[in-house]
Image: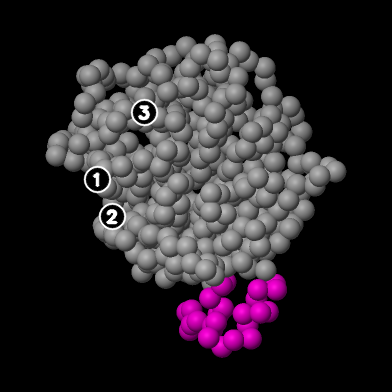
């Protein structure tokens, strides 16, 4: 058992399970995906139908690279301006815009909305950045901030101690965030504690079923139905009604920690991924007093842990990251048919983000792969390097200043205590990189294991 960045996964006795990488990445499961080559060939990754052919640009060590020496790699601290004017249309495709650094802890969670960026760390602080300048912040006494989601004027944060906090922005002073409640609420706890049937046994202790008994690993919104889903290391996911913070249901979902949960917009399906190596599909039914989720099918069953899930905006493709460095995907419009496997990382995939036709995968190997989807074919456009620790979380939003193409702003949070801001284009030329004035990939050094030496039974 190992832990990277506070995420649980199982591994082999001799370390994290590593896959064999080939020069070509196939998203067709009928094609070969295991032709062994050297790790230097990891720079370009195509799906089976790529018409560009394999490119093999020379890659060099990250030490002394154009990235680390580039003026675009700005590390700016709290008391300095973090905003640098630039012409968006002239920004190189898949480029590092700047770094945001606040020396107070590893970054575990991100959430972006319009011109605001929320960052959570193991310092218990939630920082708010506006237009890439530190705007304000607020502190929770509820432990490490593992996940953040935004629902209109409400901000929900999930914590290591199993609590979910609700925050609201002050109408009079937008720089002030006030705690609006805790899930479950004190009223619900008192009401439930009266009935003995509301107690369950967790780790040989009696606990109310409406409370998580271990870390909250993930939060997912279904705004269409006014629901919030929370996944936990206690092997359950819970369903909350946003309007009154009431816990509607608790589902005993897996045999090990639940590392991720995603709810499909416009549908009745919910997906969970666990340290037990499975991805499960749940069907939601609306009932008079709440919801009922029943197991529909198990999409994946493997030895290595499922670490992250993501679904694209149309709700047509589900992505699953694992501790072996692979990303599986399924096509929902084809009856959840398995679409293939993306091979892009040397170590565990820790986070996933989908935006437009792009998919981003962040890893313990300190890199971010940028994949472009065309049907069921995925091509790796770039490998973003620059972080010096595992990439733990990702968030994205449409670039409001881009006028001539599909360009996105990508935020990446790392255990190196920094957040990096990238400009990424859907139409970037294959082989383009994140640093200006260079056409070669920069290979990030392999993780030295300093973030994965602790054992926590495969939790993420």
Residue carrying label 2: 299
Q: What secondary structure is marked by label 3?
A: strand
Measuring from the top left, give residue 258's x and y in whole percent.
Answer: 43, 61
Q: Are marks 3 and 2 in contact (CB under 8 Å)?
A: no
Question: Observer-nearest residue: 389 or 343?
Answer: 343
Q: Residue furthest bottom?
A: 196
Q: Quarter of the image for the N terminus: give it.
A: bottom left
Disc 1 and disc 3: Cα gap in Å?
18 Å
**Marking on residue 219:** none
Residue 450 is a magenta residue: no
Measuring from the top left, give residue 15's x and y in whole percent.
Answer: 32, 54
- Extent of the magenta region: 186-212
Work out whether residue 365 can be spotted.
no
Q: Residues within 10 Å of mark 2 (few under 14, many from 20)?
A: some
Q: Residues within 10 Å of mark 1 (few under 14, many from 20)?
A: many
Residue carrying label 1: 338
Question: Observer-nearest residue: 80 or 429?
Answer: 429
In the displayed structure, does residue 389 sit left or right of residue 39? right
**Marking on residue 372:** 3
Residue 201 is a magenta residue: yes
Q: Residue furthest front?
A: 288
């Amino acid at each position: 058992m190992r832990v990277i960045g506070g995420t649980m996964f199982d591994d082999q006795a001799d370390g994290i399970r590593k896959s064999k990488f080939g020069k070509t990445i196939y998203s067709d499961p009928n094609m070969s995906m295991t032709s062994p080559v050297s790790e230097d060939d990891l720079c370009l990754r195509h799906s089976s139908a790529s018409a560009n052919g394999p490119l093999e640009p020379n890659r060099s060590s990250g030490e002394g690279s154009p990235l680390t020496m580039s003026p675009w790699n700005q590390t700016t601290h709290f008391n300095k301006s973090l905003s640098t004017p630039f012409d968006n249309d002239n920004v190189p495709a898949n480029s590092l815009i700047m770094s945001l650094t606040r020396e107070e802890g590893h970054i575990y969670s991100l959430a972006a909305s319009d011109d605001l960026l929320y960052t959570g760390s193991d310092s218990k602080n939630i920082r708010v950045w506006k237009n890439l300048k530190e705007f304000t912040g607020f502190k929770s006494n509820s432990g490490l901030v593992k996940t953040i989601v935004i629902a209109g004027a409400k901000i929900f944060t999930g914590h290591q101690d199993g609590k979910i906090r609700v925050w609201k922005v002050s109408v009079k002073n937008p720089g002030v965030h006030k705690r609006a409640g805790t899930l479950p609420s004190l009223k619900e706890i008192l009401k439930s504690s009266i009935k003995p049937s509301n107690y369950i046994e967790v780790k040989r202790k009696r606990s109310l079923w409406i409370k998580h008994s271990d870390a909250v690993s993930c939060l997912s919104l279904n705004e269409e139905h006014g629901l919030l889903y929370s996944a936990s290391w206690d092997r359950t996911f819970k369903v909350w009604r946003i309007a009154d913070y009431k816990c509607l249901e608790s589902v005993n979902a897996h045999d090990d920690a639940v590392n991720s949960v995603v709810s499909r917009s416009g549908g009745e399906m919910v997906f969970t991924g666990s340290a037990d190596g499975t991805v499960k599909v749940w069907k939601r039914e609306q009932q008079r007093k709440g919801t009922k989720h029943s197991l529909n099918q198990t999409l994946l069953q493997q030895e290595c842990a499922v670490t992250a899930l993501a679904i694209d905006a149309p709700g047509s493709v589900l992505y699953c990251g694992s501790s072996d460095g692979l990303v599986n995907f399924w096509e929902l419009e084809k009856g959840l048919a398995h679409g293939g496997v993306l091979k892009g990382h040397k170590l565990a995939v820790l986070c996933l983000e989908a935006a437009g036709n792009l998919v981003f995968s962040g890893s313990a190997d300190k890199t971010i792969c940028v994949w472009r989807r065309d049907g069921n074919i995925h091509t790796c456009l770039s490998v973003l390097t620059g972080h010096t620790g595992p990439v733990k979380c990702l968030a994205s939003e449409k670039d409001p200043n881009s006028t001539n193409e599909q360009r996105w702003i990508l935020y990446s949070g790392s255990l190196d205590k920094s957040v990096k801001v990238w400009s990424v284009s859907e139409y970037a030329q294959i082989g383009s990189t994140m640093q200006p004035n260079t056409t070669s990939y920069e290979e990030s050094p392999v993780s030295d294991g300093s973030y994965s030496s602790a054992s926590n039974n495969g939790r993420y």
